[in-house]
Amino acid sequence: MTTQALTAASFEQTLLDNDIVLVDWWAAWCGPCRAFGPTFEKTSTAHPDIVFGKVDTEAEQSLAGSAGITSIPTLMIFRAGILVFNQPGALPASALEQVIASARALDMDDIRAQIAQSKTAAAAS
């Protein structure tokens, strides 16, 4: 699967409709973003079951702001709609493959239980 542009209109639904979504936050003027782009694109073809989305932070400033993007490129991985990875900086292909493997290996029932426990603890304090 090739990468797809994500916008404020499509972002949330894309996260809800897919098990794993990688999001590359980028801008055309950003050298490291342009360097990471081909790696992201090539990796997307090796994982057709994963959505690889790109958000142009210049065109989608409000979306980037609501996501807390302060540095680009930033890579986020969502699993079952939950943010499980968030790191600024361009990754080499091998590191990108490692974070994808880690995201695939997550026990999402355990993650949801941890989130629920954290919310319960926060409400109690």
Image: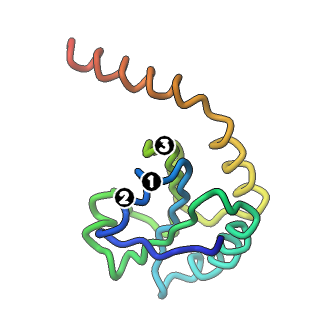
Name the quarter where the C terminus is drawn. top left
Count of number-bearing discs:
3
Type of amino acid under label 1: Asp
**Eyeballing the image, is 91 above or below 110?**
below
Element at label 1: helix
In contact (CB < 8 Å): disc 1 and disc 3:
no
Q: Which residue lies at the image location 49% right of the left edge and 72% below the top edge? A: 54
Q: Position of residue 18 (x, y in %)?
A: 50, 53
Q: Rounded to the nearest whole Å, what is the CA distance between mark 1 and mark 3?
A: 8 Å
Could you classify mark 2 by the number of other residues whose Cα lies within 10 Å: few (under 14), some (14-19), or many (20 or more)?
A: few
69 lies above or below 117: below
Q: Is residue 21 above or below residue 27?
A: above
In the rendered structure, find residue 41 and report the number of the disc placed on it: none
Label disc, if present, on residue 17 of the rendered structure: 1
Is label 2 in a helix, a strand or a loop?
helix
Amino acid type at image mark 2: Gln
Amino acid type, residue under disc 3 in the picture: Ala
| Tag 2 residue | 13
Quarter of the image for residue 50 reads bottom right
Cα distance, mark 2 to mark 3?
12 Å
| Crowdedness near tag 1: few (<14), some (14–19) or many (≥20) residues, C-alpha within 10 Å | few
Q: Is residue 120 left or right of residue 6?
A: left
- Secondary-structure class at tag 3: loop
Kindly indicate the quadrant of the structure image that contains residue 32.
bottom right
Q: Are marks 1 and 2 in contact (CB under 8 Å)?
A: yes
Using the numbered discs, state the Cα–Cα distance from disc 1 to disc 2 in whole angstroms. 6 Å
- Which dot marks residue 80? 3
Instruction: Indicate the position of residue 92 as horizontal and vertical percent values.
Output: 73, 64
